[in-house]
Image (cartoon, grey):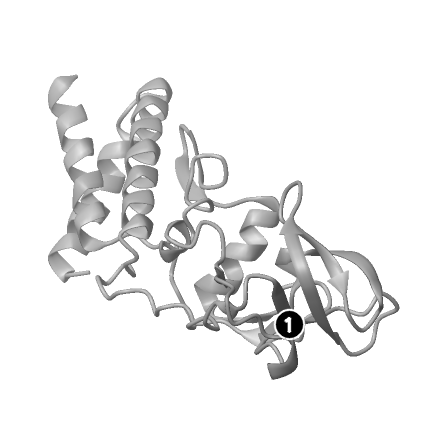
């Protein structure tokens, strides 16, 4: 932020104090709404506040070979190290559950797709040469990170006559903080902790600060 803009903000503070409580509240609400919209647009564009692109997510393992057989590591029911599962002739059931014949368990089992720790190549003896590929559902949608987190449901804006804020609350705030500051966390309950790249979900750009000042001056000109 330039020194000129900082000086303008100091002047803006004095101008705000000259407004009535109801006038400040109305203006703060409009500013909060405007800033929240800008934050959502920037996140959708996958950009940091300084204009740099978000660090891309780590590339995922290629699709599992063999429509009829899959191999993966899955959390053990009693805890401990994940066990290898070789599942033959599986199908998708309600939600994101995979149901099929667990070769090592010797019985039909169901597994939650989202709890898979790691996908592994299918052992040669179990491969189905004529099979297709299992692909992650919604893969195209997942290319845009934080698509759901940036919606109005999670990215909130509130204001009163003293000021306004734009940010996350509750569980969404915990998730956002991990990415905002590049912290460590477990991607799932039984998975090992991993480091996440720093991706600033919140942060006003210089253009947004200038926009807030423009809104203030426009409001003053209209009263």
Q: Nearer the viewer, residue 104 or 140?
A: 104
Residue drawn where x is 39% and y is 49% of the image: 141
In the orientation shown, which residue stands out farthest toward the front? Answer: 130
Residue drawn where x is 69% and y is 64% of the image: 88
Residue drawn where x is 66% and y is 59% of the image: 89
In the orientation shown, which residue stands out farthest toward the bottom? Answer: 124
Relative to 121, is 204 above or below?
above
Residue 186 visible? The answer is no
Q: Nearer the viewer, residue 27 or 182?
A: 182
Mark 1 secondary-structure assignment: strand
Task: Locate residue 17 relative to residue 115 in the image: left or right.
Answer: left
Residue 181 visible? The answer is yes
Q: Position of residue 197 (x, y in %)?
A: 43, 72
Q: Position of residue 69 (x, y in %)?
A: 62, 66
The residue that label 1 is drawn on is: 71
Quadrant (top left, top right, bottom left, bottom right) of the N terminus:
bottom left
Q: Position of residue 172 (x, y in %)?
A: 55, 48
Q: Nearer the viewer, residue 4 or 100?
A: 100
- The picture quadrant where one finds residue 77 is bottom right
- The picture quadrant where one finds residue 18 is top left
Residue drawn where x is 35% and y is 68% of the image: 56
Task: Locate residue 179 relative to residue 34 in the image: left or right.
Answer: right
Quadrant (top left, top right, bottom left, bottom right) of the C terminus:
top left
């Amino acid at each position: 932020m330039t020194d000129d803009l900082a000086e303008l903000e100091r002047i803006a503070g004095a101008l705000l104090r000259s407004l009535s409580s109801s006038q400040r509240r109305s203006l703060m609400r409009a500013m909060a709404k405007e800033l929240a919209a800008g934050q959502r647009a920037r996140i959708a564009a996958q950009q940091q506040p300084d204009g740099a692109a978000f660090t891309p997510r780590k590339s995922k393992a290629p699709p599992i070979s063999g429509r009829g057989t899959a191999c993966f590591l899955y959390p053990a029911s009693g805890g401990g190290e994940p066990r290898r599962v070789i599942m033959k002739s599986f199908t998708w059931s309600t939600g994101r559950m995979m149901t099929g014949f667990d070769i090592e368990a010797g019985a039909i089992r169901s597994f939650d797709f989202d709890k898979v720790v790691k996908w592994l190549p299918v052992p040669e003896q179990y491969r189905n040469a004529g099979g297709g590929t299992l692909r992650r559902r919604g893969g195209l949608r997942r290319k845009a990170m934080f698509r759901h987190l940036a919606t109005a449901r999670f990215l909130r804006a509130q204001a009163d006559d003293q000021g306004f804020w734009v940010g996350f609350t509750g569980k969404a705030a915990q998730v956002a903080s991990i990415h905002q500051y590049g912290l460590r966390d477990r991607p799932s309950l039984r998975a090992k902790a991993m480091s996440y790249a720093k991706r600033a979900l919140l942060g006003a750009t210089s253009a947004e600060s200038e926009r807030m000042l423009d809104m203030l001056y426009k409001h003053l000109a209209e009263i």
